[in-house]
Image (cartoon, rainbow, N blue to C red):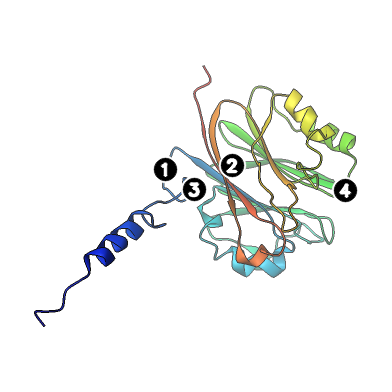
Amino acid sequence: VNKIYACNVALEELERLDRISKNKNPTIWEKVNDEVMKMSFLNCHSLLDKFEDIKSDSMLLKSDIICLSETWLKTDQFQEDLNLRNYNLKLNSISNGKGLATYFKLDIFKHEKDIKLESMQLSKFSANNLDVISVYRSKEGNERDFIRQLKSMLSVGKVTVISGDFNICLANRKSNQISSTLQALGFKQLVNEATHIEGGHLDHIYIRGIINAHVELYSPYYTALDHDALCLSLQVLDQR
């Protein structure tokens, strides 16, 4: 027994691995910070099929607001089996392959407005110091019409986040009409990585206002063959 001892090299390696472990180095999204607003955006490709996974997803459940697109629901009628604990639900549904579902905390957000068209859906939510607009735009959605609808939802002088599946690949069409217009309106696009399994930069986040913002891509196993989730952590700064 007296001859059994740990290898110093092994101990040093164990300490090194511990220092760089995920438990010792949580991301901004994973850290608890009451001053940071957290919002997530995901093309879920059928909410009914993915709901059991979503309601158990500890990453998404860190969000103050969860914005889901491509819900594939045909009605906005409340469904008890889509209820998510500690969140209110607002549906903006139209048909298969389209639609929005937004889970939000009532003590932080309130629903403001929906736009429901065949080729685009938009839902606006407001908090004390910012607006969030969740979007889904079909490939055939007219860009000029989308811009017109989006402008009708903007509040003057308020920090605003616009995000969702735009079905425009920023890798191939960086100077598209929607992005160019939003840039001219003072918005900055934050996502610089592919969000689709085929390499497309289809999911965007546009922000206007004085904020500290950090975006993380998260790949849920249940949408691994389609889209990544966008996890946005932000802190609105004093704008005086």
Q: Residue at x 87, y 49 (%)?
A: 139
Residue 42 in which image quadrant: bottom right
Judged left or right of residue 75, residue 227 is left
Is label 2 or label 3 in front?
3
Judged left or right of residue 57, residue 161 is right
Q: Earlier in the sequence, mark 4 or mark 3?
A: 3
Label ID, residue 119: 4
Q: Compared with residue 209, is residue 149 higher up or lower down, i.e. above or below?
A: below
Q: Earlier in the sequence, mark 2 or mark 3?
A: 3
- How far apart are the two marked residues, 4 and 1, measured between alpha carbons? 38 Å
Q: Earlier in the sequence, mark 2 or mark 1?
A: 1
Residue 171 in picture, x, y percent from top left:
76, 43
- Give the residue pinned by disc 1: 33
Residue 148 in picture, x, y percent from top left:
85, 32
- Give the residue pinned by disc 2: 109
- How far apart are the two marked residues, 4 and 2, measured between alpha carbons? 26 Å
> Element under label 3?
loop
The amino acid pointed to by label 3 is: Trp
Closer to the camera, 112 or 95? 95
